[in-house]
Image (cartoon, rainbow, N blue to C red):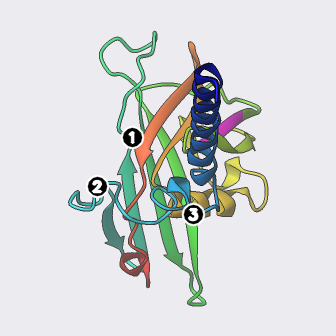
Amino acid sequence: MDIKKIVVAAALGLAVAGCGGGYDTIDAAREGLGGMSSTGSDSNRPTNPDQKSLWEYGQSGTSRLANIKSLNTVPTPNNEYNDALMTVQIHNFVDSQGEAKDYLNITVLFADTRCAGSCQLRFKRNGSTSAVYQVRESINGVFSENSFAPGDMEKLIKLIKMSGKASITVPLIGVPDAEFEFDFSGYDESKMSP
């Protein structure tokens, strides 16, 4: 057999194996196929198992509170002394009939939101946008139950509870896409039970 044919055949075999290997690796990392993305940030565990949860818990009467702050701040032109910071609070309230329900307050500190009539709040997980909410208004930088369309607050609470690394993007005055990053992992449902 000609030595040139052997070398060409070997090179083609390596090229095909190289292409296939890369595809298999990418395919294995896709959602739901048993790759890296099917576990990790989708689970309710801290990204680093030795790291304690960043959630803080409290109680006021029959209400349980879970609070978390963004990992980053966003510089804004209107406040030269304090960059904008976001806090998220899940509030489990027991009403007079004994029924418990979760409420959500998202507060932007040290900045004004550009949300007087309507704006978008985007929730990004694993680097891509997983939900977009049309928000009616933000009063004093606070997005609450009245800010969301019916059912949207509950959907966002569910996303937050099951997320690891994620971000929330809102428009601020002077900053069209202010992205606040969070590590929501480690949310403890048992500490929020009435």
In terms of image quadrants, where is residue 155?
A: bottom right
Give the CA distance from mark 3 to mark 1. 30 Å
Count up the numbered dots.
3
Mark 2 = which residue? 48
> Which numbered disc, 2 or 3, marks the residue closer to the eye?
3
Residue 179, percent from left and from top? 52, 30
Residue at the left extreme of this rendering: 50
Q: Which of 188 and 90 is in front in this view?
A: 188
Instruction: Name the chief secondary structure element in magenta.
Output: strand
Task: State the separation of the CA atoms marked 2 and 3.
Answer: 20 Å
Q: Label 1: which residue?
A: 70
Circle 2/circle 1 CB separation < 8 Å: no
Q: Which of 16 and 13 is in front in this view?
A: 13
Quadrant occupied by the N terminus: top right
x 57%, y 63%: residue? 34
121 part of magenta stretch: yes
Q: With respect to residue 72, does 45 lie above or below?
A: below
Q: Would residue 183 appear left or right of 127 to someone viewing this image?
A: left
Which quadrant of the rendered structure holds the C terminus? bottom left
What residue is disc 3 on? 34
Task: Look at label 2 and name its amino acid.
Answer: Asn
Element type at marker 1? loop
Task: Measuring from the top left, give residue 89's x and y in whole percent.
Answer: 45, 56
Q: Which of 36 and 117 is in front in this view?
A: 36
- Locate residue 135, reporting x and y percent: 72, 41
Q: What stretch is highlighted in magenta?
A: 120-124
Give the camera-side residue of 34 and 173.
34
Depth-wise, is mark 3 or mark 1 nearer the camera?
3
Q: Residue 183 carries which label?
A: none
